[in-house]
């Protein structure tokens, strides 16, 4: 419930009622005019309760009123109790993102108001402390409870019972006897401030040079962009932790963006080791209560460091002094649903608006960031070697076309070649750990009938159903549709003819278990690890050497440090290398390079084996030679010749709806009405990669333009030419990173 502020009745002489523009967190074109209570002014960012139709919604004062509505028709917006407000710089950021991505500003505002309960007055909670009364009857449990309470800390009934190892009934008895007295505490325990000097790390010369540069940037308190470019295991995290320490010493807030929740598991522990406490977290798995706590602490400046997913960009920081984007190349930073934006690019914008430095960290930077660093737009900080005694692993290609390496049905081998099995045997015999990587969930990506050729596809998407053998289900990984594993073909009714085609991680694990029945292994994918708790348990089990071999998808590819992991085997290095879009090769190189980087991160040398049927491919050769920069230069020349990003601009229109004929008709109209403009080409319409997704037909158009072209202005002019019915959605994707 939204609580308006309780205002005293204004004196009769005050009749003026200021009119302001109020932005609502809805996909509306702009702010609406509202009155404020007589004699009350509210600045940009002030939160108000605004009537809309027959309901009341949360709104934000955005600026001056347009004045197009008569005073007698204006509705009254009431400021909230306590007068909470979004920082004006956050409001500026929301406007910028909306203008750049062509989203309604209210849709972007909605992402900044993800915890509306944070604006409610803070509730109080009752806790208990030791009083002056000693009950006449003192059992051993009562004595123990009062001894614990004697430290003066206020505890809840359950908290004291747990700390004293007594029942809640014992604590309640002490309360009734007056031995424990109630006291009021804030709704949430305060966040402990990270200590910049809690622990220090020995740095090598390259790290120290980078640290000196970042410390200076954090102290200068002005906008700058730094690409922290270091090989896997080079200590990038330790370097930017020193920048965090410098920002904290300036009493500034810090935002650290991670692409996936799974990466926070070990990161939070490393942060606590360096700063003495964990940072605040912000991601989709938080409860509403915890979300309210973090949002409120960020808004009042109590939360000094926030580690979060891309949505944390829209938190109401009061005094942001540093932004860090770890694994900046990751495609997960791109939000594809709803308001489409790229968190890495928007992080740079937010830092510019806030007037603070931003650090982009990666062992395999995006080509855009690499080119910006090479051209001097970003400060390029390089870490060329691994930290301490660790060395980069040896990378070797296994040619699956070679007669010595192919699958051997008699030995039950389909996916693990003889050289990979030999390396696994050697690593396990030495008491070392290994990782098998395949970026494909489930047991098999396709099930078909060998009698009639029927393929199991999703009725709602143009996608195959993936077999999940352990759950005995066929599932669509696009919309979530599932059905039990059938016993016969629905097309020809034959039994015993359904066969799995291709491997997923479950099938690789099955084969591994056949060859190594005594090895301890675990499967790590989003199907088997549900949420941060399970992911954390699996990572800790690997770190404690309770697992010999981890078999997983890209969830295990980055950010994790396992000192005893010496062997990485990539089951299908060719997977993803021919996605048909301009970034396919770059993404394949980045993913495999990150996977390879898990091996040999401590004293023992690492070995990476890539199984491929295309060993002469430029990606495979660059990985084998360790020639990352050579691959980037080659990729750069391809992009430059094609006028593709970062040497040109792209934008996509995705037209979708349940009426396929209408979707195709609107797409054709858009194609025909595309304005002619210099240095602009329009491709399409054509069916999207997933032409049917969640029951909706999808068509795509692609705009290619020179860097100097104002793509947003072109798109606005174009979209104004076609009336799109409400049943059809046209989504605009500026700077697309995929073409699905």
Image: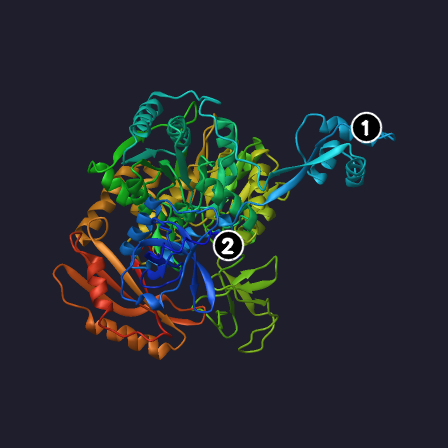
Mark 2–mark 1 distance (CA, rounded to whole Å): 44 Å
Q: In this view, does 244 lie to the left or right of 677?
A: right
Q: Which of 449 and 291 is in front in this view?
A: 291
SS at badge 1:
loop
Return the x and y of residue 572 as percentages of the image width and height: 43, 50
Task: Please name the residue shown 34% across and 48% down the image.
Answer: 43
- What residue would you read off at disc 2? 3
Return the x and y of residue 476 as percentages of the image width and height: 50, 64
Which label sits on residue 625? none
Sequence-wise first label, 2 or 1: 2
Return the x and y of residue 531 as percentages of the image width and height: 55, 49
- What residue would you read off at disc 1? 134
- Assess disc 1: are there few (<14), some (14-19) or many (≥20) residues with their C-alpha within 10 Å of its C-alpha: some
Quadrant housing residue 694: bottom left
Is there any visible trace of residue 419 in the rendered image? no
Whether tag 2 and tag 1 are in contact, CB under 8 A, the answer is no
Quadrant, the C terminus: bottom left
Quadrant housing residue 693: bottom left
Task: Please name the residue shown 43% across and 63% down the image.
Answer: 51
């Amino acid at each position: 419930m939204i609580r308006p502020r309780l205002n005293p009745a204004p004196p009769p002489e005050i009749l003026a009622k200021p009119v302001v523009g109020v932005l609502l967190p809805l996909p509306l074109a702009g702010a609406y005019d509202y009155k404020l209570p007589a004699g009350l002014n509210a600045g940009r960012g002030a939160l108000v309760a605004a009537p809309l139709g027959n309901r009341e919604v949360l709104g934000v004062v955005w600026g001056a009123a347009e004045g197009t509505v008569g005073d007698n028709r204006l509705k009254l917006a009431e400021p909230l109790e306590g007068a909470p407000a979004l920082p004006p710089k956050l409001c500026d950021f929301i406007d910028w993102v909306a203008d750049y991505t062509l989203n309604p500003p209210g849709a972007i505002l909605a992402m900044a108001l993800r915890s509306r309960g944070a604006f409610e007055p803070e509730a109080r909670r009752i806790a208990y402390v030791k009083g002056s009364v000693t009950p006449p009857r003192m059992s051993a449990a009562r004595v123990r409870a009062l001894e614990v309470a004697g430290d003066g800390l206020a505890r809840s009934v359950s908290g004291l019972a747990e700390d004293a190892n007594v029942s809640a009934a014992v604590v309640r008895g002490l309360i009734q006897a007056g031995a424990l007295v109630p006291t009021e505490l804030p709704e949430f325990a305060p966040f402990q401030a990270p200590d910049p000097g809690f622990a220090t790390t020995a740095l090598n010369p390259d790290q120290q040079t980078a640290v000196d540069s970042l410390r200076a940037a954090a102290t200068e308190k002005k906008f700058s962009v730094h690409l922290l470019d270091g090989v896997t295991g080079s200590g990038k995290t330790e370097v930017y932790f020193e920048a965090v320490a410098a920002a904290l010493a300036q009493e500034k807030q810090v935002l650290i963006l991670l692409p996936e929740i799974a990466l926070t598991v070990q990161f939070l522990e490393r942060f606590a080791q360096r700063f003495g406490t964990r940072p605040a977290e912000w991601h989709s798995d938080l409860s509403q209560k915890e979300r309210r706590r973090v949002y409120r602490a960020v808004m009042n400046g109590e939360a000094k460091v926030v580690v979060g997913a891309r949505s944390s960009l829209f938190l109401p920081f009061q005094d942001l002094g540093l932004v860090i984007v770890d694994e900046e190349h990751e495609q997960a930073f791109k939000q594809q649903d709803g308001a489409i934006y790229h968190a890495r690019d928007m992080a740079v914008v937010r830092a510019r608006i806030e007037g603070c430095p931003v650090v982009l960290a990666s062992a395999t930077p995006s080509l855009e960031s690499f080119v910006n660093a090479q051209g001097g737009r970003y400060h390029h900080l390089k870490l060329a070697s691994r930290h301490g005694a660790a060395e980069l692993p040896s990378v070797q290609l296994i040619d699956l076309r070679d007669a010595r390496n192919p699958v051997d049905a008699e030995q039950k081998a389909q996916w693990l070649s003889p050289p990979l099995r030999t390396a696994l045997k050697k690593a396990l015999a030495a008491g070392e750990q290994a990782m098998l990587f395949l970026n494909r969930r489930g047991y098999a990506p396709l099930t078909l009938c060998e009698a009639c050729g029927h393929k199991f596809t999703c009725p709602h998407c143009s996608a195959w159903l993936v077999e999940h053998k352990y759950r005995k289900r066929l599932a669509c990984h696009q919309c979530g549709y599932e059905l039990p594993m059938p016993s016969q073909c629905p097309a020809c009714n034959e039994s015993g003819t359904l066969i799995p085609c291709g491997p997923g991680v479950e099938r690789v694990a099955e084969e591994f278990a056949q060859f190594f029945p005594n090895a301890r292994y675990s499967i790590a994918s989003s199907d088997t690890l549900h949420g941060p708790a399970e992911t954390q348990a699996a990572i800790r089990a690997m770190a404690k050497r309770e697992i010999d071999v981890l078999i997983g998808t890209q969830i295990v590819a980055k950010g994790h440090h396992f000192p005893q992991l010496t062997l990485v085997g990539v089951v299908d290095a060719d997977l993803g290398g021919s996605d048909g879009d301009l970034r396919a090769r770059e993404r394949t190189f980045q993913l495999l390079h990150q996977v390879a980087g898990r091996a040999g991160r401590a004293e023992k040398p690492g070995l990476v084996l890539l199984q491929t049927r295309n060993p002469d491919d430029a990606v495979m050769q660059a990985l084998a030679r360790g020639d990352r920069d050579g691959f980037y230069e080659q990729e750069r020349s391809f992009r430059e010749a094609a006028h593709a990003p970062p040497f040109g601009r792209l934008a996509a229109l995705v037209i979708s709806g349940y009426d396929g004929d209408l979707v195709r008709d609107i797409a054709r109209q858009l194609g025909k009405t595309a304005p002619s403009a210099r240095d602009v080409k329009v491709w399409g319409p054509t069916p999207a990669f997933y032409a049917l997704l969640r029951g909706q037909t999808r068509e795509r158009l692609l705009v290619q333009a020179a860097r100097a072209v104002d793509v947003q202005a072109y798109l606005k002019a174009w979209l104004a030419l076609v009336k799109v019915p409400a049943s059809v959605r046209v989504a605009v994707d500026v700077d697309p990173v995929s073409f699905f």
